[in-house]
Amino acid sequence: LSRRLPLLGTNDELDRLSATINRMLSRIATSYERIAQFTADASHELRTPVALIRSNAELLLMEPGSSPGMLRGLADILSESTYMTRLIGDLLTLARSGNEDASIPMELLELNESVRGILDRARAQAMLRNIKLEYLPQDQVVPLLGNQAMVERILMILIDNAVRYTSPGGRIWIETWVTAEHCGFAVHDTGIGIAQSHHEHIFERFFRVDSARTPRDGGSGLGLSIAKSLVEIHKGTIQLESEIGEGARFEIAFARADIVHGVTTEHQLTH
Ligand code: ADP
């Protein structure tokens, strides 16, 4: 070391060091741009087929003589593809912005309503697996400055997991809550639970608990990492409480729109 120290002091050595750092930084910037470009391209490519599905569902809904079952199916296709259109639009905005939260459209939401909005979809899913789904809303208005499609997506990821990791006959319940400064929701289930040792990895991309223990039709290991990044776009937090065999509870907390953002809710948010 003592032989190298004087060398580090020379201009030549410092120049080389700074050139290396600059090269590394420029490589990092290029890969970041590539990722953002990929997300933008993928969202853009998804837009057209989803728009086509939507307009066909609309046309078929207008056809006379469809059976009630067919009408219900088409209405589902229409509402799911409308939801996807919004989400794709938001992802595109996010990828193009380069700045994680500057251009995500935020609106004044009422959390009880947001949860209620996706309950029908979730109920159908739970019913298919003979799982009881309950909703315990706050009886108070819960104002949140957020992006509706993203909040719905967070909820759907958590409910979808709860359904997949709970055996038939089990129970899932969702509650909304509010304190002086925060509001949020929690999704509980009576499923297989998650061992403490996995808690620190559960929100990492592609992380899945022991694949032998998880159902065959399980997902990609991306759900919770997407949920976490959507929560963070809202400057919120996501927490897990669970023990193996004891079910799981995922809790999301956001800042209250009226307290933190000074948004008045009296006229805009009424049940
Ligand atoms: P996946 O698509 O595999 O469900 P996620 O990122 O959504 O990916 O979840 C990561 C892992 O966390 C899952 O593979 C599963 O092992 C575990 N997990 C998630 N939610 C629950 C839950 N409600 N109960 C038990 N385990 C869960």
Image: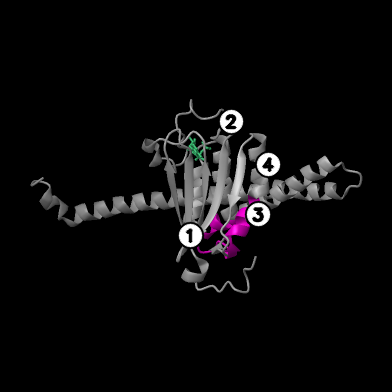
Mark 2: C-beta under 8 Å from nearest atom of ligand 1:
no
Which amino acid is tagged 1?
Answer: Phe
Report the Cα–Cα distance between label 1 and label 2.
32 Å
Look at the numbered discs 2 and 4 and tell me whether their residues touch, using CB distance below 8 Å. Answer: no
**Mark nearer the N terminus (2 vs 3):** 3
Q: How busy is the neighbourhood of tag 3: few (under 14 within 10 Å), some, or many (20 plus)?
A: few
Nearest to viewer (mark 4 / mark 1): 4
Residue denoted by label 2: 217
Look at the numbered discs 3 and 4 and tell me whether their residues touch, using CB distance below 8 Å. Answer: no
The answer to whether any part of residue 99 appears in the image is no
Q: Residue at x 39, y 37 (%)?
A: 198
Q: Residue at x 57, y 35 (%)?
A: 170
**Mark nearer the N terminus (4 vs 1):** 4
Name, please, the residue furthest toward the right.
65
Look at the numbered discs 2 and 3 and tell me whether their residues touch, using CB distance below 8 Å. Answer: no
Which amino acid is tagged 2?
Answer: Asp
Which amino acid is tagged 3?
Answer: Gly
Nearest to viewer (mark 2 / mark 3): 3
Report the Cα–Cα distance between label 2 and label 3.
26 Å
Which amino acid is tagged 4?
Answer: Ala
Residue denoted by label 4: 124
Q: Secondary structure at mark 4?
A: helix
Q: How busy is the neighbourhood of tag 2: few (under 14 within 10 Å), some, or many (20 plus)?
A: few
**Mark nearer the N terminus (1 vs 2):** 2
**Mark nearer the N terminus (3 vs 4):** 3
Q: Which residues are magenta?
A: 90-118
Q: Secondary structure at mark 3?
A: helix
The disc at residue 254 is: 1
Q: Can you give x and y, in whole percent of width and height, for residue 136 in the image?
A: 58, 52
Report the Cα–Cα distance between label 2 and label 4.
17 Å
